[in-house]
Amino acid sequence: MIAEVPVKGYFEENCFFYIDDKTKHGFIIDPGAQADGLLDMVRKNGWKIEKILLTHGHFDHTGAVNKIREALRIPVFAHRRSDEYLLDARKNLSALCGPAVIVRNVEYLDDGDLVALEANPDFYVKTIYVPGHTTDSVMFYSETDHVAFVEDTIFKGSIGNYQYPGGNPEDLQRSIIEYIFTLPDETILCSGHSEQTTVGIEKKAINAGNCKEANSD
């Protein structure tokens, strides 16, 4: 099961719960704000969240991490280059918008790593490195459920923003074409700042010249 939860701190961002229906264990992906509300949702649904997964280190995707990690006593996973953002308030943009957001002591992921539930090892996502929005950007892909948590690499009708520190348009284009558009067309794309879409829809939009550059984080 996928639960999309819009949360709002300085920006609005889509946080995702990815839950195994058999065990009610799962992951929380990019908890950007409103930690109390997210924790309340976990309790009300009887979920057991095993891991926090981060697609990249911008503060609007990490703002609730520390409180949730402490409350649930769970680890945080992010790409090996994530400390460039998680430990730098200017690079993760929090210094430009309010109090600094710093996330320490994450467990590192590399391209191709699988992240599985302890309660059900058959329930897992694959880490795919997709630089371009940031140098630490990854997506989490489930071949079983035909879903990819792409967050800020691509949105419905637009590509991600590459104008922040570490962004690169060539890398972003390569990541989208080589790693997202090579997934099956029916793959659902769960993004950080738009409605859900699919690989097939976005490929058609690109080919028709209807895909634009995003202005949001």
Image: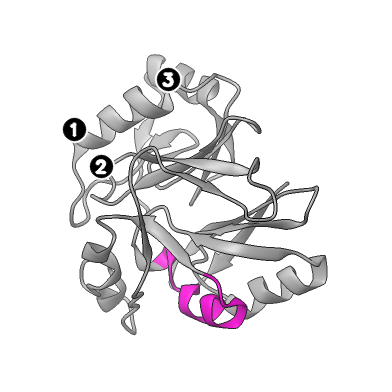
Q: Secondary structure at mark 2?
A: loop
Disc 1 marks which residue?
Answer: 170
Name the spot of residue 121 as percent of width and height, x first.
63, 46
Disc marking residue 182: 3
Q: CA distance from mark 3 to mark 1?
A: 17 Å
Point out the tag, 3 or 1, that comes first from the N-terminus: 1
Name the spot of residue 25 as percent of width and height, x first.
71, 58
Q: Is residue 116 visible?
A: yes
Q: Residue at x 79, y 48 (%)?
A: 21
Disc 2 marks which residue?
Answer: 132
Q: Residue at x 50, y 74 (%)?
A: 64
Q: Residue 64 colored magenta?
A: yes
Q: Residue at x 34, y 61 (%)?
A: 57
Residue stretch in magenta: 60-74
Q: Residue 179: which quarter of the image? A: top left
Amino acid type assigned to the residue bearing label 2 in the image: Gly
Q: Secondary structure at mark 1?
A: helix
Q: Nearer the viewer, mark 3 or mark 1?
A: 3
Q: Residue 124 colored magenta?
A: no
Q: Is residue 190 left or right of residue 136?
A: right
Q: Secondary structure at mark 3?
A: loop
Amino acid type assigned to the residue bearing label 3 in the image: Thr
The local crowd at label 3, few if under 14, some if 14 to 19, many if 20 or more residues have their Cα within 10 Å, is few
Q: Quick check: 190 above or below 8?
A: above
Amino acid type assigned to the residue bearing label 1 in the image: Glu
Instruction: Answer whether labels 2 and 1 touch (C-beta < 8 Å).
Output: yes
